[in-house]
Amino acid sequence: MAPPAFILPSEGLEITHSLSILNAMLDLRGGASKKRRKGGSRTASLHGTNKKTATGRRVVSGSKKEEKKSALGEQFSKYKDIMPLTRIYITLVGVVTGLSIVLGEEMTQGLFALDPVRLIYGLELWRPFTAAAFLGPPSIGWLMSAYYLFEYGSALERQYGSAQHLLFLFSQIVLLSGFSIFFGQPFFGSSIITSMLHVLSRLMPTQKVKWLIFTVPYWALPYGLMAADVLQDGNAANALPHVLGILTGHFYFFHKFVWPKLGGEEWLTAPGIITRLLDPDARDNAKNAANSALRSRKRKKGRKLGGK
């Protein structure tokens, strides 16, 4: 009987190492392996759908494109969430600013400025709207003005509805067009922003707000904005657009909120057809508020009659 063959430990390690190298080579070229997945033997291919790197991690194709699409979709959803009239106004500002970059300063003045002769005799009826939408060339001041337009315009439209905000914008464009023609102002976009801020500040004048590094009452904010523009350029003429905006904004505030309380007629109210188009839920909300007020009055009268 032949004696049993003994394998030295070093030889066993070499054989195990060789087998592991052989299995790794078979896995790499897509051959069979001792370890098989459930559901039968399937050979892998270098050109398969599950691509892997040298470290064994999967390569996710199209992830950058998906991230770009998701980022664009998020920005578009934020744009759609802006109040409708404020969104249209900001879009018009962007279009006019882009065209001014392409056309140049001289062509911008000739095409978009408020020219009374071309407006009246040439029937160039777009000029009041482009004069209200032009905030100057792209700069830090332009970014701040666009932010103020978004912030104050959204707050005002959210507070009183799109129909009433449309009436506010229309009244400001008409009044500021007359003032700008009289004082020779070709554009009045900053005046509309100041008028928005003035109306909001008069609604809650004593509320404390942060402006730059100061805490000021809300009513002083339009004047602080005017002072900042004057000090920035060192030119007192920069105060004129803000003064005009304060005057036209106060005209709207007085006739909308103060004059009816003094017994006058409330004539600055959006027509019913515009309210139905832009604020379809406003009438239902008004009816519900009126019904709840009548119910509360009836309850109070019932309590008085009952001796409570």
Image: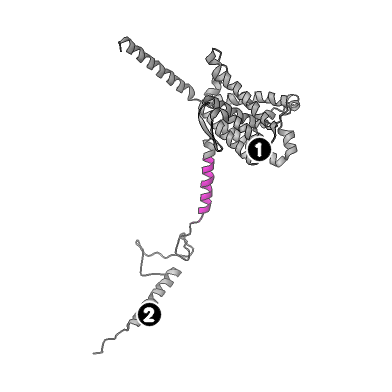
Q: Nearer the viewer, residue 200 or 88?
A: 200
Looking at this view, name the residue that lies furthest to the bottom.
1
Say whether residue 69 is magenta. Answer: yes
Say whether residue 39 is magenta. Answer: no
Q: Residues within 10 Å of mark 1 (few under 14, many from 20)?
A: few
SS class, disc 1: helix
The x and y percentages for residue 259 are 56, 16
The x and y percentages for residue 261 are 52, 15
Q: Residues within 10 Å of mark 2 (few under 14, many from 20)?
A: few
Q: Is residue 268 visible?
A: no
SS class, disc 2: helix
**Residue that mark 2 sits on:** 14
Horizontal side of residue 163 vs 240, given as left or right: left
The x and y percentages for residue 233 are 68, 37
Horizontal side of residue 216 vs 104, given as left or right: left
Q: Nearer the viewer, mark 1 or mark 2?
A: 1
The image quarter in which residue 308 lies: top left
Residue at 39%, 74% in the rendered image: 20
Residue at 72%, 28% in the rendered image: 124
Q: Residue 232: give its label.
A: 1
Residue at 57%, 29% in the rendered image: 220
Most common SS among magenta residues: helix
**Image coloring type:** one colour
Seen in the picture, residue 121 relative to 69 is either above or below; the reply is above
Magenta residues, start to end: 60-77
Residue type at mark 2 is Glu
Q: CA distance from mark 1 to mark 2?
A: 82 Å
